[in-house]
Amino acid sequence: MKIGRLNHVGVATPDVEAAAKVYAELYGAADATPAKDFPHLGVKVIFVSVPNMQIELIEPLGEDSPIHRFLEKNPKGGQHHMCFEVPDILAARDAMIERGATVLGTGEPYIGAHGVPVIFVHPKNTGGVLIELMQDPAFYDGSEGR
Ligand code: CO
């Protein structure tokens, strides 16, 4: 298993609309999706497209949101994770476990904000960086896990 393309960088923020405005006005990155709620993930998301990837702006939805805890430590927001594409999410998950890494949650891939299965690898395994692995949409057949 070898990671592929960087798909996006996740940025936690208390306000996705305000954050998207900053990327548009300060950096000229105005190609952004409308804000969308993902109640099952506990997040509200805007994707800002830049030529080689996206910036995933993430705002917590509710107190149980994983982003809520992050913002308690970093009230103004900050870089949250990096996401790399993999050709086979289950093979990637198995490789992570085999190589001694900790896959967060149940360990089963679930559908993320991009509509494809994802897993997260614990930041302790990567020098403090939370890594998301995402099924490459080009190799996705619509099934979720095994
Ligand atoms: Co992400």
Image: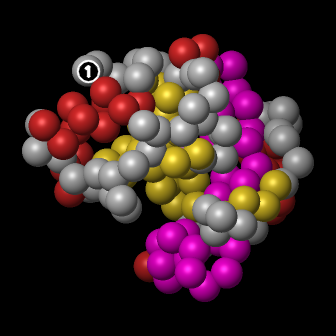
Residue at the disc numbered 1? 1
Residue 36 visible in rendering: yes
Q: Is residue 60 left or right of residue 92?
A: right
Query: Is disc 1 placed on a helix, strand or loop?
Result: loop
Residue 128 within the magenta-colored segment of the rendering:
no
The spot of residue 74 in percent (x, y) is: 49, 74
Q: Amino acid at mark 1?
A: Met
Closest to the observer: 41 or 132? 41
The spot of residue 139 in percent (x, y) is: 54, 15
Q: Is residue 10 left or right of residue 131?
A: right
Q: Height in image: 67 above or below 81?
A: below
10 Å neighbourhood of mark 1: few (<14), some, or many (≥20)?
Answer: few
Colouring style: secondary structure
Q: Residue at x 60, y 14 (%)?
A: 138
Q: Residue at x 36, y 59 (%)?
A: 106
Closest to the observer: 143 or 63? 143
Quadrant of residue 115 within the rendered picture: top right
Q: Height in image: 110 above or below 48?
A: below
Q: Residue at x 59, y 47 (%)?
A: 112
Q: Height in image: 51 above or below 24?
A: above
Quadrant of residue 43 within the rendered picture: bottom right
**Magenta-colored span:** 45-72
Q: Is residue 44 left or right of residue 2?
A: right
Q: How many marks?
A: 1
Q: Residue furthest right?
A: 34
Quadrant location of the C terminus? top left
Label 1 beta carbon within 8 A of ligand 1: no
Residue 47 within the magenta-colored segment of the rendering:
yes
The spot of residue 42 in percent (x, y) is: 64, 68
